[in-house]
């Protein structure tokens, strides 16, 4: 994949970058989508995305007034199934859903430049809870890293491993997220390595990670990071790319006034 252009805000999915897998301490995972529900999601999501197209410019890219989940029926699970546990209070009125790839340059940029302020001012104050979903578009190490976070979640440390990955980010497809390094990261955060290695060896979360990427495609996402803000009245706002903190503030404050 070419180096991202300086004006871009997300890592874009190309026709050649659709890898497939080789082989509750803070919240709950949603169940995997059924075949019937998946078909319904494609039909419903396609209908509203046809109306609310995303601006393809590298500047601010977000859209509002996506239909409420009560009109989408079972498709609400596309945001919550195959995901991380919640980060923050389950009672927070706003949910921020991020679709990301741990090798993604702009996902790393968001983590280091924006996420800490969201955590301090909105998550820790009980206003926002965060869900992370995998969209593994860059390479095999992306898939392995994603599976590793869910293996860490078996020991109650999803978010600690998530942070460890971004704090050791080193580029795309250059080996920093190799299996050997994933074990080292697991050791760094105090995981039981025997349990972690068995989980990885078994491919325990292979299906979950693949299903999360399928959810992203069903939503029409073509790059990472991509965000959905679900407000207290269940209206959804979509944000594409590693947008500045002010973009998130404006949407959060608008939702909190409802």
Image: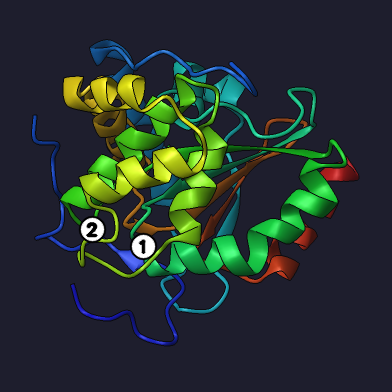
Provide the residue designation for mark 2: 138
Q: Tell me the quadrant of the picture where the N terminus can be found.
A: bottom left
Task: Examine the rendered structure and indicate whether residue 235 appears above or below residue 238.
Answer: above
Q: Residues within 10 Å of mark 2 (few under 14, many from 20)?
A: many
Q: In which quadrant of the rendered image does the C terminus lie?
A: top right
* C-alpha separation, residue under disc 2 versus residue under disc 1: 7 Å
Q: Residue at x 41, y 35 (%)?
A: 149
Q: Is residue 49 above or below residue 105?
A: above
Judging depth in this view, the residue of 192 and 251 nearest the camera is: 192
On screen, residue 107 above or below 82: below
Say if mark 2 contacts mark 1, CB within 8 Å. Answer: yes
> Residue 212, position in %: x, y?
34, 33
* Residue 135 seen in the figure: no
SS at badge 2: loop
Mark carried by residue 104: 1
User: Left or right: where does residue 252 sit relative to residue 29?
Assistant: right
Count of numbered badges drawn on the protein:
2
In screen coordinates, is 117 left or right of 65? right
Q: Is residue 127 visible?
A: yes
Specify the farthest residue to the bottom: 6
Residue shown at 68% from the left, 31% from the top: 234
Question: Nearer the N terminus, badge 2 or badge 1?
Answer: 1
Locate residue 236, reporting x and y percent: 62, 41
Task: Using the image as rendered, state which of residue 27 and residue 13 is in the foreground.
Answer: 27
Q: Residue 121: x, y in percent?
A: 84, 53
């Amino acid at each position: 994949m070419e180096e991202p252009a300086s004006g871009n805000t997300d890592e874009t999915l190309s026709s050649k970058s659709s890898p497939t897998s080789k082989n509750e301490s803070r919240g709950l995972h949603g169940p995997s989508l059924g075949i019937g529900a998946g078909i319904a999601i494609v039909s419903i999501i396609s209908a509203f995305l046809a109306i609310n197209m995303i601006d393809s410019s590298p500047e601010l890219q977000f859209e509002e007034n996506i239909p409420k989940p009560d009109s989408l029926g079972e498709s609400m699970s596309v945001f919550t199934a195959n995901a991380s546990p919640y980060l923050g209070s389950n009672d927070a009125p706003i949910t921020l859903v991020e679709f990301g790839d741990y090798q993604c340059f702009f996902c790393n940029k968001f983590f280091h430049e924006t996420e800490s302020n969201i955590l301090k001012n909105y998550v820790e104050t009980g206003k926002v809870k965060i869900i992370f979903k995998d969209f593994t578009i860059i390479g095999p190490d992306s898939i392995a890293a994603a599976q590793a976070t869910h293996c860490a979640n078996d020991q109650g440390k999803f978010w600690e491993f998530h942070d460890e990955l971004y704090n050791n980010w080193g580029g795309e497809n250059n080996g920093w997220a190799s299996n050997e390094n994933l074990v080292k990261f697991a050791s760094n955060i105090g995981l039981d390595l025997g349990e972690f290695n068995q989980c990885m060896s078994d491919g325990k979360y292979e299906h979950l990670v693949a299903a999360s990427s399928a959810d992203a495609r069903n939503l029409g996402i073509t790059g990472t990071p991509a965000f959905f803000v679900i407000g207290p009245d269940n209206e959804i706002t979509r944000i594409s790319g590693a947008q500045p903190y002010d973009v998130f503030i404006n949407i959060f404050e608008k939702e909190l006034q409802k």
